[in-house]
Image (cartoon, rainbow, N blue to C red):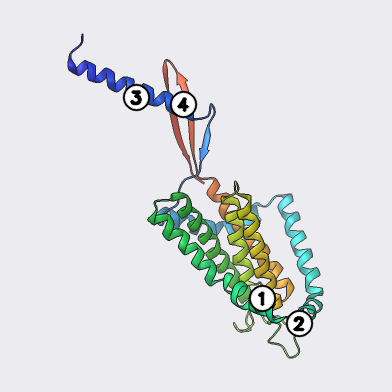
Amino acid sequence: MGNPKQKAIIKIRDLALTLMVCLLLVAPASAQDTLPELHINKDYLLSAATDAANIAIAPVGWDGRQWLGFAAFTGVTLLLFTQDEAIRDFYLRNHTTAQDNISKYALDPLGKWYLAGLLGGMYIYGVAANDGHTETAALLTGKAVLLTGGYTLLLKSLFQRERPYAGDPANPNTWNGPLGGWGDNSFPSGHSSVAFAAATVLSAYYHERRWVGITAFSLASLVALSRTYDDQHWASDVFAGAALGYAVGRLVYNNYQKQKITVTPFSSSGFTGLTLSYTFR
């Protein structure tokens, strides 16, 4: 019989071995990647600055597939540009009181105040309930929305396209950028861009819940369509905004995915355990 100290050491050893066995039973036989939780701190702010820079220089690293996608985007935008007046006339001829109210009280604020309230509510809940998953979703989506909004404002100031309701008569060919003044800011649509940025991140983050992506993109599409219905934007503005929001949302989420905590079981020289590694982008 050993002394009490030896017995205590043996118990601790046995407990540690038991815990390790349990971890190995739960963990997969190969490496498993876990995405980190986000919090408002220095790392989060630094990631926002890094993402903003990556957006600006993204075309430098595009491959053939991405340039093909950009060419398709340009082609569709130009095609819509040729049909902007016809699409506007269609919407103006098909207004109803019910649709006007839905657009005014539901879809228009959804592209700004309701979205801000949703993300703010998610963040507050995540912090209060110690739910890091929800907090991360709010912060990741919020970052994409803010970056999209910033680049949307930049493009608006460069192009300075006249809004359809502002012209007499309305003229989709009026572009006053980049020195014409802030009054003309139709291209691209800000409501459309931030709605699609949010939908893209939420859909990717909650990819295991397909209804989230379906709902998010459906609402984003309705927000985008309402901007043309309300005569706030030309159809080409709306499409360009949606494409911008999607692209920024994908970049932000892809960069987040590169920050991985990898858990790998190992067994060597009689020792068994788990290794943890953190991947920085």
Upstream in sequence: badge 2 or badge 3: 3
**Rendered residue at 53%/50% (across/down):** 256
Q: Secondary structure at mark 1?
A: helix
Q: Secondary structure at mark 3?
A: helix
Q: Amino acid at mark 3?
A: Ala
**Rendered residue at 76%/84% (across/down):** 171
Q: Amino acid at mark 1?
A: Phe
- The residue beneath circle 1 is 159
**Rendered residue at 23%/16% (across/down):** 7
Where's residue 149, x and y in %?
Answer: 56, 68
Residue 245 appearing in the image: yes
Q: What is the C-alpha distance between the residues marked 4 and 1?
A: 58 Å
**Left or right of 72 on screen, residue 100:** left
Q: Nearer the viewer, residue 28 or 247?
A: 28
- The residue beneath circle 2 is 92
Q: Look at the picture and state if 114 lies above or below 253.
A: below
Quadrant location of the N terminus in the rendered image: top left
